[in-house]
Image (spheres, grey):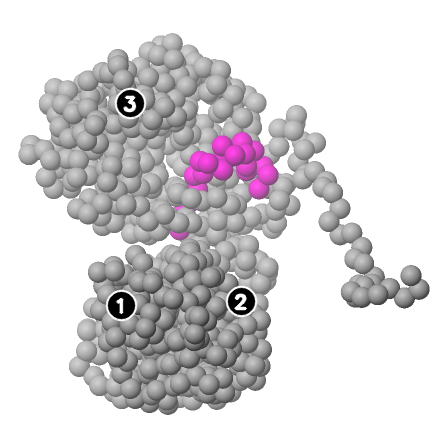
Amino acid sequence: MPTSGAPAHGARGRAADRPLRAAIVGGGPGGLYTAALLKRLDPEREVTVWERDAPDDTFGFGVVLSDETLGGIEHADPEVYAALRRDFVRWDDIDIVHRGTRHTSGGHGFAALGRKRLLGILHDRCRGLGVDLRFRTGAPPTDRLAEAYDLVVAADGVRSTTRESRADAFRPHVTTHRCRYIWLAADFPFTAFRFEIAETEHGVMQLHGYPYAPDASTVIVEMREEVWRAAGFDELGERESADRCAKIFADALGGHPLSSNKSAWTTFRTVVNERWSHGNVVLLGDAAHTAHFSIGSGTKLAVEDALALAACLDERPSIDQALAAYEEERRPVVASTQRAARASLEWFEDLGRYLDQPPRRFAFNLLTRSRRVTHGNLRLRDARFTESVEREFGCPPGTPPMFTPFRLRGLTLRNRVVVSPMDMYSAVDGVPGDFHLVHLGARALGGAGLVMTEMVCVSAEGRITPGCAGLYTGRQTEAWRRITDFAHERAPGTAIGVQLGHSGRKGSTRLMWEGMDEPLPDGNWPLVAASPLPYRPDSQIPRELTRAQLTDIREQFTSAAVRAARAGFDLLELHCAHGYLLSGFLSPLTNHRTDAYGGTLDRRLRFPLEVFDAVRAVWPQERPMTVRISATDWAEGGTSAEDAVAIARAFAAHGADAVDVSTGQVVAGERPEFGRSYQTPFADRIRHEAGVPVIAVGAISSWDDVNSLILAGRADLCALARPHLYDPHWTLHAAAEQGYAGPGAVWPAQYRAGSRPPRTGRADAPKPRLTLREGPVRGA
């Protein structure tokens, strides 16, 4: 008998003397489809499925599958695809009903069928292929299965006993979220995927509904835990809950009742595993990962897992290699899906935040909540709907949202694009030189509404590296004036802003390309900070600032601000993020003071607000001031999202015109959750809860992202860094690619001839008229 550690066979299914034997724990769609594929690829395989419930027992009602998933099924098993196709209900529209108004967006393309029917199709296929289906039978313990079978597939769901039996190997992380939801059914078909919002005396509730049969629809009712309790659902049984939901959403249901099927209120759990396989045991579907139902079904992911696992087992010479390949293939896809699902889930958790948005903008916000559907996607799917949202927003005809103007105090930006501050480490004695002129000048010519300098330091001791620029001498002021004059003269309409900061405990380090955050080998200068805590174990220990030193530093900021005004900057940003000096006061991880500048958030805010007030007092009143903050430290015990809102409110109350919402870089041990536009939810929350304009940053890489964020109301401006390093004319090229030539993106006269994309080689060559078959050629 082969052991789990050293199977004596190839993954294609044959050992020297017998075929592969596979045990599948769980008879849901993922487990059944895996069984069918394994058997179809090699009929000699012995495949057994254990399912503790009866064949007709199922939870939920309808299952939605994407065209991509269906394409994979059609390619792998045309017979299953044909059976599914006969029963699918298809539709294109999404209806969003909010405060009595329905908005419809079309062109989306959905396909669904009943879960019972899906299971029936897979049962028939498995039986026809010779799979051993064992219903009403719990699987043997995992260790026994692993010894008796060559492969064990754990498809036993979100509460997988297989996973828990080897938790030390799989290392699962389960996150429980804030909403309660229940799966129900209606006895009529919705004509669209329907989202309905109910504002009740107890709080906001939402309905997600879609058809899955000619005479039936799935209905999911969801609400925050506190709303669920306030409404008394915690005291109602299954039937009473269904009846109560039917009354709340009577308009959406047309008075129809709701039915249940072992339906219970539950809380969604996000499952992530550090490993998906151990020995010859592999996780699949919800046992390995979950994604919130609001972006699709777990069935979709499970079926895609099954396709990938079966293919890898067929392609690789050993099970070990096949399982490694399966995880390598699927993990990035699942991680991307889970990020989108998390964004969607949190949007619905915080639904109340958006209820006062204009109705079409609310609908657009809902449709783009996961960041997978974008402004560009929706224009392709339903141009009429998207144009109606743009009109409501105030876009002139033919103007993408990113090219609408935005006003900050006395400054009007011609578009919503900001060149984010990027340290260049190329100054000499704090003086910006020709490199800065070319770098910032090129980006000013590139069309952005606002070009920001790198962090400009308020003292020599406040530099990060010896190459950092400053504004603490007259020579530096003159050098910056040269740059602002160029921007204003050669790129009229582009604003240029200065970011003032002090390195704090993160100073006296090497240039980035010589070793980021590494101490200088020699020539170090003393560091100061809120508390005497080094940034890294090998970093210099800073001195804790005294009251007198705090006053000196505040005056350094005001002196630098006066010089910035003389240098001709249009906007000033105070850098209170990324672990530099002022950020070090805000975070509880870096501020351990016991005086009036430490302890509670109000006290930690005290010195940054003192600096802000002093700078605002000397900065020209008509010119705007912004503040950059780290909205989270990405570390336990650090700044929370609630803290970030309070910090933003405090700066807004003191006169900040906008908050530049970044995250992290406060402590070396941070664990960021990277992904597309991953920092924008923090900006979104601050914008809606603090009521202050925000600049969103963080992996915003496309003009489609910018249009989506602006139109959905998640941000007022979008700051991009790396895209502007790749392409200094990013904004102008975005205009050209969208066919826009209005006042929001003006090409310099010298570059106007290049305002259209250059021609490329032909890509539409005529196709061959005939395709010759292999074989002898007649007449040769």
Q: Is residue 373 toward the left or the right of residue 755 in the image?
A: left
Q: Is residue 730 magenta?
A: yes
At 44% from the left and 70% from the top, the residue drawn is 16
Q: Which residues are magenta?
A: 714-734
Are the residues flagged by discs 3 and 2 in contact, CB closer than 8 Å?
A: no
Q: Which residue is mark 3?
A: 509
Q: Amino acid at mark 1?
A: Arg
Residue neighbourhood size for the residue with mark 1, other residues' Cα within 10 Å, grouped as few (<14), some (14–19), many (≥20): many
SS assignment at label 1: helix
Q: Position of residue 553 (x, y in %)?
A: 21, 21
Q: Which residue is mark 2?
A: 68
Quadrant of the drawing holding the C terminus: bottom right
Residue 163 is labelled as 1
User: Of label 3 and label 1, which has the lower sequence position?
Assistant: 1
User: Of label 2 and label 1, which has the lower sequence position?
Assistant: 2
Q: Nearer the viewer, residue 638 or 779?
A: 779
144 shown above or below 458 = below
254 shown above or below 500 = below
At 58% from the left and 71% from the top, the residue drawn is 75
At 38% from the left and 75% from the top, the residue drawn is 22
Front: mark 2 or 1: 1
At 72% from the left and 41% from the top, the residue drawn is 760
